[in-house]
Each structure stands twice: as structure tokens, then as C-alpha cells.
Amino acid sequence: MQDIEKVISLYHLGTVQNGYRAGANTFPFIDIQGNVRAVQVKQFDEQNHTTGTDFLHSIIEKHHSRNNKPLPEWLKAYNKNETKVSCLFGEHLLSKYPYNPIALVEAPKTAIYGTLYFGFPEQPTNLLWLAVYNLSSLNLNKCKALKGRNVYLFPDLSKDGKAYDKWIADSEQIQKQLQGTYFHVSDLLEQLAPQQDKEQGKDIADYLIKQDWRLFRKQDIRETPQPEPKPVETSTREKSEGPQKNFFYAA
């Protein structure tokens, strides 16, 4: 229970209290300056599968529309942003934990499970878990905040390995433009997962949830020391403190 409260505080997680999507979890995307860029709203079933997804700004907009109320000025300004999810989930933690290696996944939920199982970033050898939002969200603009870090990517599974291949190609291009930043794409799931799991698009959280988290902590898993960071690795298959008071940041 203590770890649950700790991870809620660390990532500023919340819930929708009433109305549309009541009871859903909220995952705020907070940039390194502490500005809230977006708040993803997700509902899950008892098997941890997503049953509904939305964004808080969309819910607020629908509420005002149903009640014939004008949109607040901040929301009008926010809607002009070309990209709503414009930073990494957990990005606000980069300045607070400047030495940790980074674990990068697609979904915020996966980052939360990674933190709970592998440990919190107070130890500089522990991974700091961040998320990009979805498969196509791995891009240079989001990764600029990772400059100078070692980044370990854990793409979701996909049919024919397309997600893995895409993150290999994308990370290679990003690394070329971020001096001193090194991306390492894990092929663990690609090598070990059965075809059914690949077709279902499972991620690392789907495997972690079946394990006893206490076993992970007892092993005191640490990053393997490396004399010098290496460039993007391919498999043999392919030879900041809390948010500011402003609710959303209109760039």
C-alpha cells in the first residue's frame, strides 16, 4: 500500500470523481518545466485490460457542450496546440533524478508497473520509467528531454514484429540528432513471446502483473555496468517537481 501511494504521488496520478468516465484513472503528461501538457483518462477491467480511453480536456469540452456553456479561455488556447501529447509521461522526473538510466515504454500504465516491480528511482542505478503515449509517439521532439541519457526501450509486441522494427528505425534516427544519448531497444519479448501474445499486442506489463513483485525487489536488480554506452542495438533478427497551477499548457 505504501508503494501504491508513493507511485501515485511520484507521477501525480488521479481519478475522475464523477460524471462521464467516473472512476477512471488519470495519467498527466507533465513536462520538465512542470507544465501539464495533457491528461490521459483510462478505464481498466479486473484483468488490467483497457475498457475506455479519453483525454481530460475532451471530457471537459463535452461537459460544456452538453450544458450549453462557453469553453473557458484556457481550453480555447489549449485546443490551438497542434500536438496535445507533446511531452513524455514522467518527464517532470528527469531533473529530479538526473543520473538514472531511462526505461521508455508506450503506455503510462506500463511505466507505473515498471516502477512498482523494478523499484523507485531514488537509487541512481534503478531505471526511471517513462512513456511516450503510443507506438507512433516516439519522436525527436519528445526525446530532446532525454539528451545525455542511456535509454532502454521496451516496445509492445505486434504481429510480425512491426512495432519493434519501427522503434529500432525511429530510435536510430533520433540518436543521430541527440549527441551523447544512447538508445538500446530490448528484443526480450520478441524472442520469447508466443505468436498469440504478439497478435494481441501485449506489453511488458502484461507479463509483470503475473509475477510476484517481491521477487523482483529481492533480486535487487541493477543496471549492468558498461565501460562505454553503445549505439542503438538491434537483435539478430534484423542485423522536475510537481505541476504548476495552470491546468494545461498552451504552447
Image (cartoon, grey):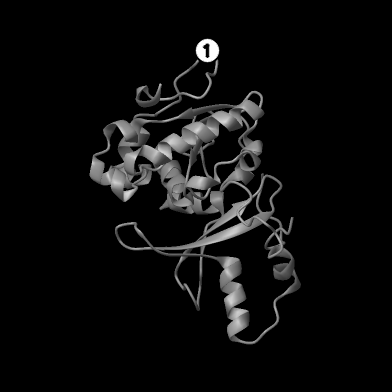
Q: Which residue is mark 1?
A: 227
The answer to which image quadrant residue 60 occupies is bottom right
Q: Position of residue 226 (x, y in %)?
A: 49, 16
Asked if 63 appears above or below 46 in the picture, the reply is: below
Q: Position of residue 117 (x, y in %)?
A: 39, 41
User: How many dots with numbers?
Assistant: 1
Q: Position of residue 33 (x, y in %)?
A: 71, 47
Seen at 66% across and 37% down, the residue is 144
Asked if 72 appears above or below 12 in the picture, the reply is: below
For label 1, the SS is loop
Q: Nearer the viewer, residue 101 or 144?
A: 144
Seen at 30% across and 50% down, the residue is 200
Q: Position of residue 73 (x, y in %)?
A: 75, 72
Amino acid carrying label 1: it is: Pro
Q: Quadrant of the C terminus?
A: bottom right
Seen at 69% across and 53% down, the residue is 35
Q: Nearer the viewer, residue 42 or 10?
A: 42
